[in-house]
Amino acid sequence: MSGPMRTALDILVFPDAEVLDVMGPYEAFSLATHDAGGEAFDVRLVAHNATSDRVVALRNGLRVVADRTIDTRATDASVGDGILLVPGGPGVRRLLDDAALHRWIGVRAREAQLVLSVCTGAWLLGLARLLDGVPATTHHQGFDDLARIAPTCDVRRGARFVDAGRIKTSAGVSAGIDLSLHVIAERLGAAARDRVTTTMEWPHD
């Protein structure tokens, strides 16, 4: 395993995204970065449908200020290929017909090292044609919808997360933390993951 790398990690945010889908991975990857002396992940929020000051209201009204929007992200040379994480939540249903966003996810995914989803974020990966012939999971209430959106996807019902190589998907809400910890272990080692779980007091084997 190579040493720690500083990797851009873009978390998509949009109105009514599930709070823990966003903040759980944000916390896990940020803690791993702190533990590595700042040389692991450069975690930032990339907004869709933000206000002019980049404020996005997540589910239940929690407001976050994004680092950039999807319109400015493409011109930011510092981002690199990195990692894309797409959360879920009630707001996903309002994005099902947003062809421009689906195209952006597809383009961003082609340049990314890894593409991650939490909960119904998998639906957006499906609409971007990233799950064609790929095993994936989503929130337990969204299995049938994912099968409809991505008919050739091998929907893994009941899986906590599914690692399909470059595409990794997780079940609902807290499962995104498990997926994040899995990626941290892959990239930084099991000891780094265990230090994060200890700090978070997150259960692990």
Image (cartoon, grey):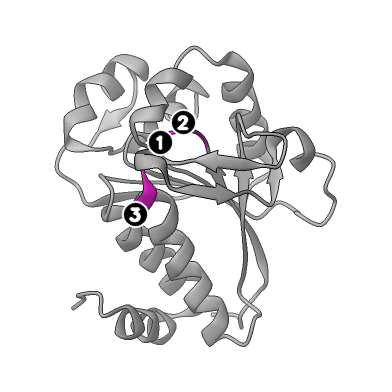
Q: Residue at x 71, y 42 (%)?
A: 53
- At mark 2, the secondary structure is helix
Would you say the residues marked 1 and 3 are in contact, meaning their CB atoms lie under 8 Å apart?
no
Query: Closer to the camera: disc 2 or disc 1?
Result: 1
Mark 3, residue position: 176
Mark 2, residue position: 125
Residue 62 horizontal side relative to residue 156, left or right: right
Mark 1, residue position: 121
Mark-to-mark CA distance, 2 and 1: 7 Å
Would you say the residues marked 2 and 1 are in contact, meaning their CB atoms lie under 8 Å apart?
yes
Q: Amino acid at mark 1?
A: Gly
- Place of residue 157 in the rendered image (x, y in percent of width and height, measured from the top left): 16, 37
Magenta segment, which residues?
Answer: 14-20
Would you say the residues marked 3 and 2 are in contact, meaning their CB atoms lie under 8 Å apart?
no
The stretch drawn in magenta includes residue 18: yes
The stretch drawn in magenta includes residue 79: no
Number of residues whose C-alpha sits closer than 10 Å to that of mark 1, classed few (under 14), some (14–19) or many (20 or more): many
- 47 or 148, nearer to the observer: 47
- At mark 1, the secondary structure is helix
- At mark 3, the secondary structure is helix
Query: Considering only vertical position in the picture, is 182 above or below 123?
Result: below
Q: Amino acid at mark 2?
A: Leu
Query: Closer to the camera: disc 3 or disc 2?
Result: 3
* Secondary structure character of the magenta stretch overall: loop
